[in-house]
C-alpha cells in the first residue's frame, strides 16, 4: 500500500520539522506531501532542507499566497491520485492531530471495512484539550447543526483529521467541490456519504496548538453555515 499524508502549511516553521519527523518515524511507512502557501517565515525552506534525508518520502508543492485550506487539499488529492496512492490523509501541521493516531485511521479502512475514517473529537463525548470554551461550543454545535440540517449521522463533520480510500476521491468530482474553508470538511464528508461510502469515526483527542498561530476566521464559519443549506438541496449523482 502507498499511504500519503497531506499537510497544508502557512507559517508553520516552528512545527514543520517536528511533524515531518514524527509522521515519517511511524512503522507503516507513510509519505508526506506538504502544500505550502508561500509562507514568509521559511516553512518551505525547512521542508526542502529535509528532503535529502527522506528521499522519496517527503514531497512539497509551493503555491504563491494563501489560497485556502480546501484548495490545498484538492490540489493534494489530485496529486495523490495521479501517483497511485491507496490511502490519502488530511492532517494539520500543529500537532492538534496526534501522528500516533494515523495508524488507527488507516486500520479502520484496511481492517474494518471503512471507505473513509474520521479522527473524531465528538463521537465519544467531547475530546478537546486547551481550546477556549467558546470555540469548543462553536465547533461542537456546528456538527449538531450539520446533523440536523442534513440528516447526516456523523458526530464530527468539521474534523480535519481524515483518511480517504482512493476510491472515495476517485468517485467525487473534485473540481465541483464548492466550499474552500471550514465548510470544505463538511462538503467532502457529506458528498462521500451521498455516494454510499462507509464512513467510520475513530475517537481521538484534539490538542490545541502549542506553537504558531491559528488560521481560523469568522468568514470561514459563515461559509460553512450557508454552504450547509446549499448542500441540503444539491443533487448528487453516483
Image (tube, grey):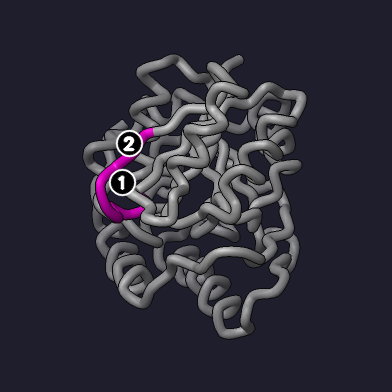
- Assess whether mark 1 and mark 2 are in contact (beta carbons under 8 angstroms): yes
Query: 10 Å neighbourhood of mark 1: few (<14), some, or many (≥20)?
Result: many
Where residue 219 sits, quadrant-wise, is bottom left
Residue range in magenta is 61-70
Please name the predominant secondary structure of the magenta segment in the image.
loop
Q: In the rendering, at what x and y percent does residue 163 appear?
A: 57, 37
Q: In the rendering, at what x and y percent does residue 14 appear?
A: 58, 55
Is residue 191 shown to the viewer in this render?
A: no
Helix, strand or loop under label 1: helix
Q: Say which mark, if any, is on residue 75.
A: 2
Is residue 24 shown to the viewer in this render?
A: yes
Disc 1 target residue: 71
Q: In the rendering, at what x and y percent does residue 182 appear?
A: 40, 61
Q: In the rendering, at what x and y percent does residue 33 appear?
A: 48, 32
Asked if residue 56 is positioned above or below residue 95 in the image, the reply reads above
In the foreground, 15 or 195: 15
Image quadrant occupied by the N terminus: top right
Query: 10 Å neighbourhood of mark 2: few (<14), some, or many (≥20)?
Result: some
Amino acid at each position: 500500500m502507498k499511504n500519503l499524508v497531506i499537510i497544508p502549511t502557512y507559517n508553520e516553521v516552528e512545527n514543520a520539522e517536528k511533524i515531518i519527523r514524527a509522521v515519517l518515524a511511524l512503522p507503516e511507512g507513510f509519505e508526506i506531501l506538504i502544500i505550502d502557501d508561500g509562507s514568509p517565515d521559511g516553512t518551505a525552506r525547512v521542508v526542502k532542507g529535509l528532503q535529502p534525508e527522506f528521499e522519496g518520502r517527503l514531497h512539497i508543492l509551493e503555491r504563491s499566497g494563501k489560497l485556502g485550506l480546501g484548495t490545498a487539499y484538492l490540489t493534494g488529492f489530485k496529486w495523490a491520485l495521479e501517483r497511485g496512492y491507496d490511502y490519502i490523509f488530511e492532517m494539520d501541521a500543529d500537532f492538534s492531530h496526534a501522528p500516533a493516531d494515523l495508524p488507527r485511521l488507516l486500520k479502520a479502512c484496511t481492517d474494518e471495512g471503512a471507505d473513509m475514517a474520521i479522527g473524531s473529537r465528538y463521537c465519544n463525548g467531547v475530546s478537546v484539550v486547551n481550546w477556549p470554551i467558546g470555540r469548543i461550543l462553536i465547533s461542537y454545535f456546528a456538527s449538531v447543526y450539520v446533523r440536523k440540517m442534513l440528516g447526516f449521522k456523523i458526530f464530527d463533520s468539521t474534523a480535519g483529521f481524515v483518511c480517504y480510500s482512493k476510491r472515495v476521491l476517485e468517485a467525487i468530482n473534485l473540481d465541483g467541490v464548492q466550499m474552500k474553508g471550514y465548510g470544505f470538511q463538511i462538503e467532502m464528508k457529506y458528498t462521500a456519504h451521498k455516494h454510499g461510502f462507509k464512513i467510520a469515526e475513530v475517537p481521538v483527542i484534539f490538542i490545541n496548538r502549542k506553537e504558531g498561530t491559528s488560521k481560523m476566521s469568522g468568514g470561514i464559519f459563515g461559509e460553512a453555515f450557508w454552504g450547509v443549506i446549499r448542500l441540503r438541496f444539491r443533487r448528487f449523482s453516483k
